[in-house]
Image (spheres, helix red, strand yellow):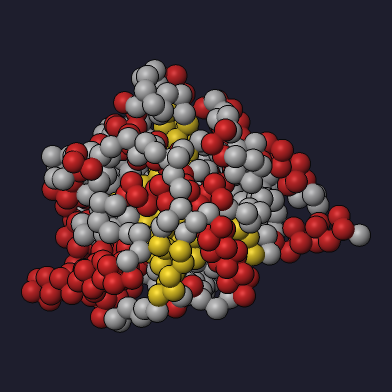
Amino acid sequence: MVSLNKSNAPRCVARGCAFGILPLALATTPAFGDPAIQTPLSPASYRERIAQIDNAGPQLNAVITLAPDASIKAAKAKGELSGLAVLVKDNIETRDMPTTAGSLALKDNMTGRDAPLVARLRAAGAVITGKTNLSEWANFRGNRSSSGWSAVGGQTKNPHAIDRSPCGSSAGSGAAVAAGLAWAAIGTETDGSITCPASANGIVGFKPTVGLVSRSLVVPISSSQDTAGPMTNSVRDAARLLSAMAGRDAADPATAQADAHAIDFTRGLATASLQGLRIGVLRKQSGKMPGVTALLEQALSDMRRAGATIVDIDFSPDPAMWQGENTVLNYEFREGIAAYLASLPGEPPARDLAGLIAFNKAHAEEELRFYGQETFEEALTTTDEAAYHDARSNAFRLAGPEGIDALMARNQVAVLISPTGGPAWTIDLVNGDHFGGIGAGSLAAIAGYPHLTVPMGAVEGLPVGLSFIAGQWQDEKVLKIGAAYEKVRSAALAVPHFTRWSAKLDAETDAQD
């Protein structure tokens, strides 16, 4: 593998030099025509782009490790994904690269194992070209974290505006796809970690039903909520990846029913239509940001013109849902991370959560320089098993049966929608993220239900996605509805500019003068 040294890479410093890489970057972004007909680059060409855009120039810090040349040359499997370059989030094990979760505690974690989902991708012909940076420990270490920062990989930047957050925790996967550093990437999500970075970076992200894709050999947070999913430039590409990834894994009990639901998810996408569908809009989860509201209304108009009926839904989740989720994640992380660390070969610096906390204290200058490990410490003390089971039952009930399921049945809608989030905020390593309170993704995350985000447009040049949510195992339906919207969307999409947001606006103003 090749560990990327960002600090020694040449920098792009002249005004406008970042714009010199636009023609290459835009060759693979959906803003320039139909994403379904774009031609993927070769793995070697993507590596050249990583050298130009990720290591040098704007230094996106999206890719944390490159696969060895020998691994790429040896990738000869034929299948639906033959020759397509795919990046994998660095909390998913690959046999030929370390799996670090962004932490120095795992920087030398070479297990020699492929996670089952990676093995499925390779068997379908995908070429795993590298690993992507992430919010350290998938953003489950402490308060005031900055999405996309890890001690191993540094701070990932949003290619649309490099002073803006890529969101997380699948920050590198989102930024890499938006920047054209791979045909697609794999992210993971416990709550928002695929869909938020997909929205913020202007790409498609799909969090499948929990249990459709194996979680074995993926650094865990929550056995109830964790899943991997595709991050791509089109719904069809997401469906292609999901078709390869889905299926039962004997080592993951959550996937016991997966084979019954693992289909060719591209089936019917080309003819998918909104005609006759009732679509529920979660108004309270759509926020009050004028630019986002205007985009949502444009999307609703597009859907009406395509034959859909729009149903406004007024819903406020019970706060006990989030309280329960907090207990569940703390308890399951403490148990799950100990089991994962115990499975590692060799002598890792820690074998349980207490060991990780001690490691971070011993390496505080590198690990704790920007934010702490309050979440780790809280999880260490969450040991009441009865309280955990009650919290899990209540959180699932409020998000699933009494949340998504009840809303869909009561309003007779095929899907629930809302903006996925607001436009990306300014990166702030001192104070952390500034989420805007827009979106309904936690409902799907806590219930374990499918959630798709599709680019909806841009606010001041920054992408915003539209979420599609439905019930358990309704992944195929969600993808079809998202694909149907993708075809009728009228809003212009954001274009990566690889410079600061203010500099981008200055350039646009100069062009108009």
Q: Residue furthest right?
A: 513
Residue 479: tell me if it is visible.
yes
Looking at the image, residue 494 sits to the left or right of residue 44; the answer is: right
| Quadrant for the N terminus in the image | top left
Which residue is nearer to you in this view: 104 or 433?
433
Q: Residue furthest left?
A: 386
Res. 130 image quadrant: top left
| Quadrant for the C terminus in the image | bottom right
Residue 443 lies, with reference to residue 49, above or below; the image says below
Residue 136: tell me if it is visible.
no
Q: Position of residue 493 (x, y in %)?
A: 63, 53
Looking at the image, residue 254 sits to the left or right of residue 231; the answer is: left
Which residue is nearer to you in this view: 183 or 282?
282
Which residue is nearer to you in this view: 186 or 4?
186
Q: Which residue is found at the position 34% from the left and 50% from the top?
A: 477
Q: How many marks?
A: 0
Q: Position of residue 341 (x, y in %)?
A: 21, 50
Residue 396 lies, with reference to residue 151, above or below; the image says below
Res. 192 image quadrant: bottom left
Residue 142 lies, with reference to residue 482, above or below; the image says below
Q: Position of residue 55 (x, y in %)?
A: 60, 42
Q: Position of residue 398 (x, y in %)?
A: 24, 74
Q: Which residue is found at the position 16% from the left and 60% from the top?
A: 335
Q: Which residue is found at the position 41% from the left and 28% from the top?
A: 81
Looking at the image, residue 374 sits to the left or right of residue 85; the answer is: left
Which residue is nearer to you in this view: 343 or 174?
174
Looking at the image, residue 196 sits to the left or right of residue 297; the answer is: left
Q: Which residue is found at the position 25% from the left and 51% from the top?
A: 473
